[in-house]
Image (spheres, coloured by chain):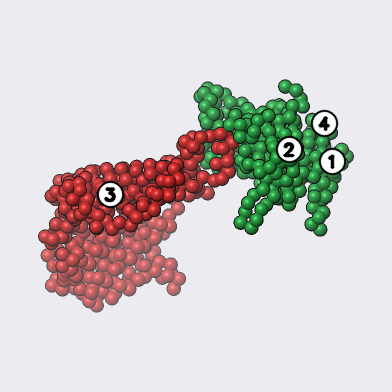
Chain colours: A red, B green
Amino acid sequence: MSFLLRNWQSSLVLALVVMSMAFLPIISSGGVGSAFLIVLLIVAGAVGAMVLKDRIAILVLLFGAAHGAVWLLIGALSGKTGEATTSFYLLLAASWLLAWRLVTVLSSIKPKGRGVDVFLRLFIPLLFGAWLLILWEAIVRGAGIPFVLLPPPSAVAARFSNSLPILAADVNQTIFKAVLFGYVVGCGTGFLAAILADRFVFMRRGLLPIGNLVSALPIIGVAPIMVMWFGFDWQSKAAVVIIMTFFPMLVNTVTGLAAAGHMERDLMRTYASGYWQTLAKLRLPAAMPFIFNALKINSTLALIGAIVAEFFGTPVVGMGFRISTEVGRMNVDMVWAEIAVAALAGSVFYGVIALAERAVTFWHPSIRGG
Amino acid sequence: MTAAMPVIEAKKLGLTFETGDGQVHALSNVDLTINTGEFVSFIGPSGCGKTTFLRVIADLEQPTSGTITVNGMTPQQAREQRAYGYVFQAAGLFPWRTIERNVALPLEIMGYSKQEIAERIGRTLDLVNLKGFEKKYPWQLSGGMQQRASIARALAFDADLLLMDEPFGALDEIVRDHLNEQLLKLWARTEKTIGFVTHSIPEAVYLSTKIVVMSPRPGRVTDVIESDLPRERPLDIRESPEFLAIAARVRDGLRAGHSYED
């Protein structure tokens, strides 16, 4: 019994395969030819993972069996969309369990070298993500889900690679013009406003409540007005991004400037240090974790702001424009391609700022770990 | 410079804090003179105003009555002329600066040249035995080493007066003994005037030429003891009869200040 439980995925896989036999064929209008090969692969993987001793051999076998089986499963669907049977889903679940076992075994490896460590840290989430896409593909095509509801990832990928020039133009318009400009100006003015609010009491009393008001402005309401003010091109989108990013930076910087301790401030006072010297040498460095917090929050806000703002009038280019028009034309694969681009760009943007944060606030306990 | 020139002169000094539940008399009628080259300890229970007195000297608090001069000036003028170095209870090193950049901090603020800064970093880190740790960050050092670095930082700009507010309070006994010994050597080498706040009777007696015993509510000076121990003090002087006699007098002074509470 413990033998079966130690590798419960394999045990369950064998059970699923036996069950799937009762519901053959895997495609309602097809034969059992390819099903035989799929079952063979899956059983080989499951049994191999139970009996083999060498970990490398287990990993290779599991990888080959899981991906080979699912490749054949999805291949069997070509031209037969929506004809998957219960047997198909049982075998799909079995292949997925093999991949689960593969990730389990990989995760239990205690890497010896740095190279292996980095490889595992990238490979495990990649494998995980790939299987999300594989299941999406197999289920959408197997069940024949209508294209406009959810296109299979393969269609999105095909549209993505066929539309590179359009996507590049959209990214250039939305990200390299509206987002970057708005982000830099919004974060910059928020930062300067925070310094002014810190330096002059009347600014603190007057500006902070108004900043609060600005942050509460609904972007949906502001965007059309910005289009009226600054025209259809990227400038109006940048203005929306500025409004969205200004306040988080203002509030975080004001909070950060209060983060330096009393003792450190007293210390600067004993040196007869002036306001600007204390700011540069003590209070700004101490505020950096807060400022980077705002930069990270704003990186996602800016992207959302620019894309949504394009829904309210834009030249015939831009990610928001593309999403709103292609949805209207039922070209959902293009919408998904834009979403993928936005997710990718957002991740890169966030990642660059997170790296800069590690370099600047290396001294903070949350980063040096202790 | 004559040996008996007063560095600090307080006359009828008083400081009352206004708090939510009424007034707190942190200092009341303090008369005290500290002369050049003295090592003066302030000892007393919590709330006796010893730290407050040190902070008044440093112009970190303003007295509400009486007068005080530092080098013949008001504390504010003295602070603006960078007349003293201050060591706090915690090291208070900036974690984003290496040890040498921390020591350089006051020098940068005071506008020393790059070359002068480099030379002074070397000299002061040598004084506190931290050679070889220049490039370390504060959080990579032990508590005792951090506190030594903060002393180096206070020494870097060569003020004649060093104010220390329980600098070794958070350290264990062994490290504290070691640092006390080093502090005495440093005092002998630099001939500075030192004001030193402590809770510990042995520490006060071991280090000081003058011990100011204080008591709380209101914070006041109850006894000023001139120590006749030799300036050269090995650690085992603490078992000598002279040492124990002074320690007993300090203890009596502390008890007298408390008697009305019993």
- The residue at the point 56 percent across, 32 percent down is B106
The amino acid marked with disc number 2 is Lys
* 1 and 4 marks in contact (CB < 8 Å): no
| Spatial separation of the CA atoms under disc 2 and disc 4 | 30 Å
Q: Name the amino acid, label 3.
A: Val
Instruction: Give the image location of residue A55, x and y in percent.
Output: 40, 56
- The three-letter code of the residue at mark 1 reads Ile
Q: CA distance from mark 3 to mark 1?
A: 72 Å
Residue B169 visible within the image: no
Q: Which residue is mark 1?
A: B246
- In which chain is the residue bearing label 1? B
Between A128 and B178, the residue placed more toward the observer is B178
Q: Secondary structure at mark 3?
A: helix
Please provide percent x and percent y for residue B200. Answer: 75, 45
Which residue is denoted by mark 2 in the rendering? B11
Secondary structure under tag 1 reads helix
User: Dots 2 and 1: beta carbons under 8 Å?
Assistant: no
Residue at the bottom extreme, as displayed: A22
Q: Secondary structure at mark 2?
A: strand
Left or right relative to B92: residue A145: left
Q: Is residue A203 visible?
A: yes
Q: Residue extending furthest right?
A: B241
Image mark for residue B230: 4
Say yes or no: labels 2 and 4 on the same chain: yes
Query: Which subunit holds the residue at mark 2?
Result: B
- Position of residue B200 relative to residue B228, above or below, is below
Residue depth check, mark 2 versus mark 3: number of the one nearer the observer:
2
Label 3 belongs to which residue? Answer: A241
Q: Between disc 2 and disc 4, whose residue precedes?
A: 2
